[in-house]
Image (cartoon, rainbow, N blue to C red):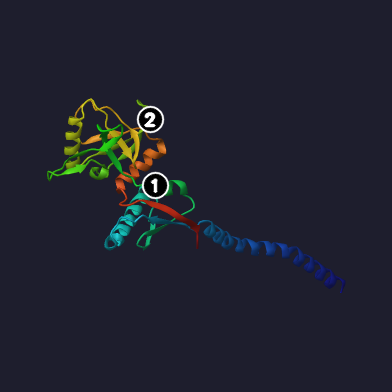
Amino acid sequence: MQRNLAASISWQRGAALGSPVLLAAALWLMAPGYAARAQAQQREPTRITFSLDLADVPEDQQDTVSVQTASIFVGRLLGLGIPDPDVLQQAAGSVTVAVTPDVDLEDVVATLAGRGLVEFREPDERGSGWKRIEERGLDGTLKPLTSAYFKPTSTAFFDKDRRQPLVSFELNDEGALMMEAASHRLLDKPIGIFYDDRLVIAPVVRSVLGSQGVIAGLSGPEAKRLAVQLNSGALPVDVAPVDATVRP
């Protein structure tokens, strides 16, 4: 009887000691599930809605402009190294993108919201400002010289000799023809390079230019951003972020 009682006490003690072990084991088994759910919650995408300025776009062309903008957004997100970008054209005048929390949200917004247009301008002889350079294209008509003629091969790099970031660009045949004519006409005069309507540099033309060139005067982040924008194409209209929320 005493043996049975002792055995019973011994078993009960073992059971009591085993309970924390069983509980710990149960918690250990449950932990991966909790961790997975917590990780999933932490990786919920940030959705950013952009508004398109369609004030000057005819109503019958607004859907086309919105689709074009969404397509350019995809190209820019890919250029930033974001695979399988989630871009949704909700309606004419509204495009929403979703990005994971591990990306630089400010860089994404700046890259998408910038027009991404480079224009070449010359001094306006009628005043102290600048005017767009217009040259004849392959069809013989006058056209503004802009990054619309850039090939999608632009690259941002740091020039050790100049000790500054640069953006290389290459013009297509029509752009090269226009650049050659403009640089020949502007020898020993400055040519203004404007990025989204902002003057970044105005070098003096010392020789006739061809199909290749570089853009200086930008910070490192700006140079990288411009290269991405040039390769994806300029936006057809101005856009601005209106909402950034995290949703499941």
Name which quarter of the figure residue 180 lies in: top left
Helix, strand or loop at mark 2: strand
Q: Is residue 22 left or right of residue 248?
A: right
Q: Position of residue 230 (x, y in %)?
A: 31, 44
Counting other residues with Cα less than 10 Å from the Cα at mark 1, is it few (<14), some (14-19), or many (20 or more)? many
Q: Position of residue 150 (x, y in %)?
A: 25, 42
Which residue is labeled 2 in the image? Answer: 164
**Which residue is painted at 59% across and 61% down in the image?**
34
Q: Is residue 31 left or right of residue 117?
A: right
**Which residue is painted at 44% across and 46% down in the image?**
107
Helix, strand or loop at mark 1: helix
Q: Position of residue 41 (x, y in %)?
A: 54, 59
Name which quarter of the figure residue 145 lies in: top left
**Which residue is painted at 27% across and 29% down in the image?**
190
How many numbered dots are placed on residues in this image? 2
Q: Nearer the viewer, residue 24 or 242?
A: 242
Question: Are the residues flagged by discs 1 and 2 in contact, CB closer than 8 Å?
Answer: no
Q: Nearer the viewer, residue 66 or 59?
A: 59
- Give the amino acid at mark 2: Gln
| Res. 104 in view | no
Q: Which mark, by number, is residue 111?
A: 1
- Against 168, residue 27 (above or below) is below
Disc 1 and disc 2: Cα gap in Å? 21 Å
Q: Residue furthest left?
A: 140
